[in-house]
Image: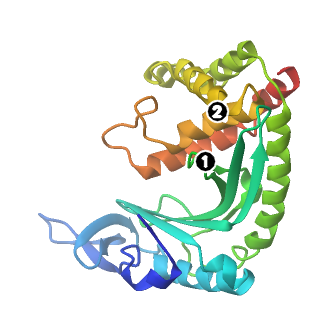
Amino acid sequence: MYTNLSDDNTREIFFNVTEEEVVGLQSNQMSPDKKMLLKNGNDYLSIVNRKYRVVTNREILIPLQEQMINYFDSNVTDDIQIKDTITGATCLSQYIFPKISREITTTNGHNTTFGLRYIMKNSFDGSGSVTLYAGMIDFFCTNGMIRGEYDVARRRHTKNFSLDGFLKIFETSIERFDADMKLYQEYADKKVSSINVKKLFETLVGTKPEEERKRSGGLAEKLFAQYLDEVQDRGSNAFSVMSTLTNFASHDSERFSISKAGDEGTLFKRQERVSNWMSSKTWEDFLVAA
């Protein structure tokens, strides 16, 4: 469900985090180096090191939103769409900017509009840093895409936690967005052969360890089937190949279903995976040979 900046007080993601001692059930002794984190004083989040610095979502998002308002024109921020996801101790907040968009036209005349978006990832189990991603979203099919490390800012959960560096990503991401749209138009203009597309998917999936490849359930074949569907709308070009990968990364569908234990966090991991695929030498070689 999407909300906007004016609905902040109603967002579940602004929950409180409290700390409690970890006490042995039998010994009744307190842990000297661990503490327990609770959501709103009731729901268990995790057990972390005593020195772990809790950084609440409100502590990150409110200043970040203020900077968005200060940096972008009001006609842009008025239409921002926000989608929050809470999965256990991990939280994602996605900010979509419909007014910052570019149109791509493929070889068969199909038009696709991309919008700019930011994703904040925070966790309360010591599993990672506070991370702000910049990326884009395809408004034609809601495929999402995050790019490489240059679109990422990270800060660890320490006593010196600061948003410095996060705010700089606004300027650099706008530049990257314009550059990526130029690149995607090149993809849209570049015709590809089905044989090379099939080889690409087999190579990308085949880079995984043997056990994971067995669990993939014929992922390369599913990707190629999706590509054939994409071709119907977008034509036989590199942009259709990219759209195939971002479809896999963005949708819990019959073809690309996630497990019962999966969620939007799982899809986010897929987006990171696809980002790595499209930054690889395998992808570069494909574009040369396509």
Foreground residue, 98 or 169?
98
Which residue type does callout 2 highlight? Asp
The mark total stands at: 2
Crowd rating for badge 2 (residues with CA inside 10 Å; few <14, some 14–19, many 20+): some
Residue 67, visible in the rendered structure = no
Asked if labels 1 and 2 touch by Cβ distance under 8 angstroms, the answer is yes
Residue shown at 69%/73% (left/top)? 166
Question: Up-down: is 35 above or below 251?
Answer: below
Residue 227, visible in the rendered structure = yes
Quadrant assignment for the C terminus = top right
Residue shown at 19%/66% (left/top)? 24
Give the number of the disc on residue 233.
2
Crowd rating for badge 1 (residues with CA inside 10 Å; few <14, some 14–19, many 20+): few
Q: Can you give x and y, in whole percent of width and height, for residue 62 in the image? A: 54, 84
Residue at the outermost front position = 109
Residue at the outermost left position = 26
Which color scheme did the rendering employ for the protein? rainbow
Q: Can you give x and y, in whole percent of width and height, for residue 108 in the image? A: 76, 31
Which residue type does callout 1 highlight? Phe
Hey, which quadrant is residue 37 in on the image? Answer: bottom left
Residue shown at 30%/40% (left/top)? 260
Which numbered disc, 2 or 1, marks the residue that appears first in the sequence? 1
Give the number of the disc on residue 195.
none
Residue shown at 56%/75% (left/top)? 158
Foreground residue, 129 or 141?
141
Q: Relative to residue 208, is residue 215 drawn left or right?
A: left
Element assignment for label 2? helix
To which residue does mark 1 refer?
Answer: 140
From mark 2 to mark 1, how far is it between C-alphas? 10 Å
